[in-house]
Image (cartoon, rainbow, N blue to C red):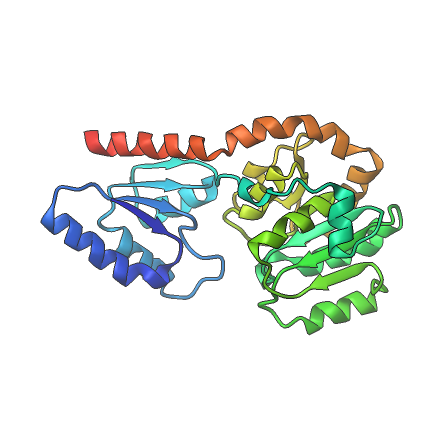
Amino acid sequence: MLVQWWHPFFAPAMATLCAVAKARSRTKILFICHNVLPHERSLVDEALARTAFAAADAFLVQSGEDRRTLSRLKPRAPAVVHPHPIYDFFASEGLSREDARAAIGEGAGPLVLFFGYVRGYKGLRHLIEAMPLLRKRVPARLLVVGEFYDDPAPYEELVGSLGLSEAVRFVNRYVGNEEVEGFFAASDLVVLPYVSATQSGIVQIAIAFDRPAIVTEVGGLPEAVVPERTGFVVPPRDPVALAAAMARFFEEGWAARMAPHFAAEKRRFSWSAMADAVDGLVDAAGRA
């Protein structure tokens, strides 16, 4: 039995289902963990996760960081690490950069994208703080696309205080699947300035669109980006380092230099590779 695990909220239901399955059959129970523990944790999350994991025979986790967390919660648990697959189904229209920009109301010039729900752990304020430093060297704009789970007012005030009102655009709403392509195709560079993480599907969306990414050195994010091949890795909470990496990307023409490497990354993050990893785990659990 394959169990999709992503949040301890569901632990009581999953623990019950697994216990019933174990009691009534000889089935092996395999957990595919999108996050072993949530990004923003409560005091009971670890206890709930241990309860759900008790009946599991093996695990597939999607980053080394999650493997280490799992080892702490369930020592000696059989587990394999396989990265999050790409979301290539978003790239359906084949939009050019120019057509995409016209569709979303953006003009010419370097464009940086922050995509996804805005929450504190994602470090958006550090990216905003990096923008004045970047713009001293490159006339780039920042496009922030995703619904705010935080209060947007402090971010908007920060933009105003830094004189970035004409350089930062917020699209504060839920973005449907059919809109994703326009924002990624329009952008030159995707930035994930997270202050904590396990992994993120945003990098895999960027790879599907052949878009380089700058990520911070937290959790499993560095596992998804190959420096100087598909992006750069910078320290978290460091606007100076982030600005320098973004400026280097634009000034040294890294978009063209990185473009040839995305075909290999798409194979590494393919769904067929994910299926092979699950099949291997199933076989191993069956022999145990």
Q: Nearer the viewer, residue 113 or 237?
A: 113
Residue drawn at point x = 72 percent, y = 55 percent: 127
Q: Is residue 240 among the parts visible in the rendering? A: no
Q: Is residue 131 among the parts visible in the rendering? A: yes
Residue drawn at point x = 33 percent, y = 61 percent: 10
Measured along the vertical axis of the image, is residue 159 above or below residue 29? below
Which quadrant of the rendered structure holds the C terminus? Answer: top left
Residue placed farthest to the front in the image? 93
Residue drawn at point x = 60 percent, y = 42 percent: 91
Q: Nearer the viewer, residue 123 or 278?
A: 278
- List x then y, in percent, for residue 105: 78, 57
- List x then y, in percent, for residue 71: 35, 44
Could you tell whether 124 is left or right of 141 in the image? left
Among the 4 quarters of the image, the one containing residue 250: top right
Measured along the vertical axis of the image, is residue 282 above or below residue 25? above
Could you tell whether 226 is left or right of 7 in the image? right
Residue drawn at point x = 52 percent, y = 28 percent: 267
Residue placed farthest to the left in the image? 24
Which quadrant of the rendered structure holds the N terminus? Answer: top left
Q: Nearer the viewer, residue 134 or 142?
A: 142
Q: Nearer the viewer, residue 171 or 72?
A: 171
Count of labels in the image: 0
- List x then y, in percent, for residue 228: 69, 31
Among the 4 quarters of the image, the one containing residue 167: bottom right
- List x then y, in percent, for residue 184: 67, 47
